Image (cartoon, rainbow, N blue to C red):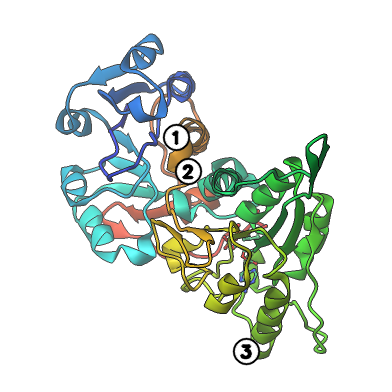
């Protein structure tokens, strides 16, 4: 069978789902590989590099979609792309099936089998395919780099002949995958880092990475217990939220950089950094809002834009951080895809065995054999 990676069509998307290295590995599973000409260009992979890795370079998107039995891509297909799918073809990409019902129906009507990389169950065995985590890790790192780029000072404290420089103070809100990556990056640059999360179990992880966990003074014994099922956060009670905002108001005049990553599955991002907190911050401070795509954790965030407030605070609301590091994110994403294909090809014979009894494959499959198979049943194994 042939695996094909088209050029991404979403404006500004620089990632690609197959790199020359991942193609070499896919060939070891018995597959032929193809890319659309120019597919890897924005991520630094030339057509010549693909050819050197034994990959066929196909001139047009239409020809690529026609030639491949399996299409691998980053973004969910748009209408034109989905209409190109054919009976029995397999699509592997981000899909967001809960928000893309029409797309789901269109792909089903084409009798194509779609595997959503955003639906890979978060169980230990599937970590190597967890593209949400690999992209969140990059976003967390890049958020700190972006903050540094907009912050006119050092992160680390210094004593120089020209004077003493205090270290920057960075507050990370939300310590999931992206938040922990941001903590690691900020502390390694020498900042004093504070982090807050509603899930108390992350305190240890935060502290082991050199940041200080921000505790709330809350009477209730369930304080800071925002943990819900599956390790995700649940919405906070109004009393808890008030306490949290009170704490943030205390910190606002003192911190130089805020990186916010707080999300609750299936809901808009909670607003945790209000207008008055922005107004309390020092001029030159920076907020990077990684929750911008879901509305933002900061009240003043404008998704996809960078703004500077009247009091001189920069608020970065970009929603394409992984794409801003396209070489790295393509490398990790294509590796996640390669692992998915490895599980789909147990006999290494270049043929997909779409085993719906397998927890991971079942969980990620959103259309199969003419049926919509989303939402999946919960995985049997942790
Ligand atoms: P996420 O992107 O859904 O949310 C980011 C963080 O925001 C979470 O830590 C959440 O607790 C926090 N948050 C929500 N509301 C908040 C608020 N009001 N104030 C402060 N913080 C708030 O998280 P994620 O990175 O996808 O990780 C979610 C969970 O999944 C974690 O428990 C993580 O360890 C787990 N996980 C497991 C695996 C695996 O087992 N393979 C892989 C990745 C993540």
Ligand 1 image position (quadrant)? bottom right
Question: How far separated are the C-alphas under marks 3 and 2?
Answer: 33 Å
Mark 2 and mark 1 residues within 8 Å of each other at the beta carbon: yes
Q: Is residue 222 above or below residue 66?
A: below
Is residue 149 found left or right of 53 in the rendered image?
right
Using the image, determine if residue 18 lies above or below residue 232: above
In the displayed structure, does residue 216 sit left or right of residue 79?
right
Q: Any mark on residue 238, and which?
A: 3
Secondary structure, mark 2, is helix
Please, what secondary structure does the residue beneath circle 1 have? Answer: helix
**Mark 3 or mark 2: which comes first in sequence?**
3
Residue 43 drawn above or below residue 299: above
Q: Is residue 223 above or below residue 82?
A: below
- Counting other residues with Cα less than 10 Å from the Cα at mark 3, is it few (<14), some (14-19), or many (20 or more)? few
Q: Nearer the viewer, residue 108 or 369?
A: 108
The residue singled out by tag 2 in the image is: 322
Name, please, the residue furthest toward the front: 162
Tell me the residue at 38%/23% (across/down): 31
Q: Residues within 10 Å of mark 1 (few under 14, many from 20)?
A: many
Considering depth in this image, is 43 or 199 the residue closer to the camera? 43
Residue at horizontal 64%, vertical 55%? Answer: 179
């Amino acid at each position: 069978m042939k695996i094909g990676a088209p050029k991404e069509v979403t404006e500004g998307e620089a990632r690609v789902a197959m790199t020359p290295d991942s193609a070499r590995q896919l060939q070891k599973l018995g597959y032929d590989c193809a890319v659309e000409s120019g597919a890897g260009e924005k991520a630094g992979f030339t057509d010549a590099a693909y050819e050197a890795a034994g990959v066929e370079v196909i001139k047009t998107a239409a020809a690529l979609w026609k030639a491949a039995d399996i299409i691998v891509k980053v973004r969910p297909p748009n209408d034109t792309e989905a209409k190109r799918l054919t009976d029995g073809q397999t699509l592997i990409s981000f899909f967001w099936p809960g928000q893309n019902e029409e797309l789901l129906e269109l792909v089903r009507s084409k009798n194509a089998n779609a595997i959503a990389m955003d639906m890979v169950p978060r169980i230990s065995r599937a970590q190597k395919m967890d593209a949400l985590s690999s992209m969140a890790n990059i976003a967390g790192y890049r958020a700190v780099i972006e903050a540094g780029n907009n912050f006119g000072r050092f992160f680390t404290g210094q004593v120089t002949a020209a004077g003493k420089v205090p270290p920057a103070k960075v507050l990370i809100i939300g310590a999931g995958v992206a938040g922990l990556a941001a903590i690691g990056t900020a502390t390694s640059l020498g900042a004093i880092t504070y982090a807050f999360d509603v899930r108390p179990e992350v305190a240890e992880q935060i502290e082991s990475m050199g940041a200080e966990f921000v505790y709330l003074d809350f009477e209730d014994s369930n304080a800071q217990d925002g943990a819900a099922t599956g390790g995700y956060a649940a919405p906070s009670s109004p009393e808890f939220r008030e306490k949290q905002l009170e704490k943030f108001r205390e910190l606002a005049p003192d911190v130089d950089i805020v990186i916010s990553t707080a999300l609750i599955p299936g809901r808009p991002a909670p607003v945790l950094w209000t207008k008055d907190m922005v107004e309390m911050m020092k001029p030159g401070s920076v907020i990077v809002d990684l929750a911008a795509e879901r509305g933002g954790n900061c009240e003043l965030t404008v998704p996809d834009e960078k703004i500077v407030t009247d009091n001189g605070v920069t608020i970065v609301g970009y929603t394409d951080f992984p794409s801003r590091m396209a070489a790295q994110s393509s490398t990790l994403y294509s590796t996640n895809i390669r692992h998915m294909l490895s599980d789909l090809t147990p006999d290494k014979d270049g043929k997909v065995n779409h085993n719906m009894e397998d927890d991971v494959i079942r969980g990620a499959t959103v259309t199969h054999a003419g049926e919509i198979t989303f939402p999946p049943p919960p995985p049997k194994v942790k």
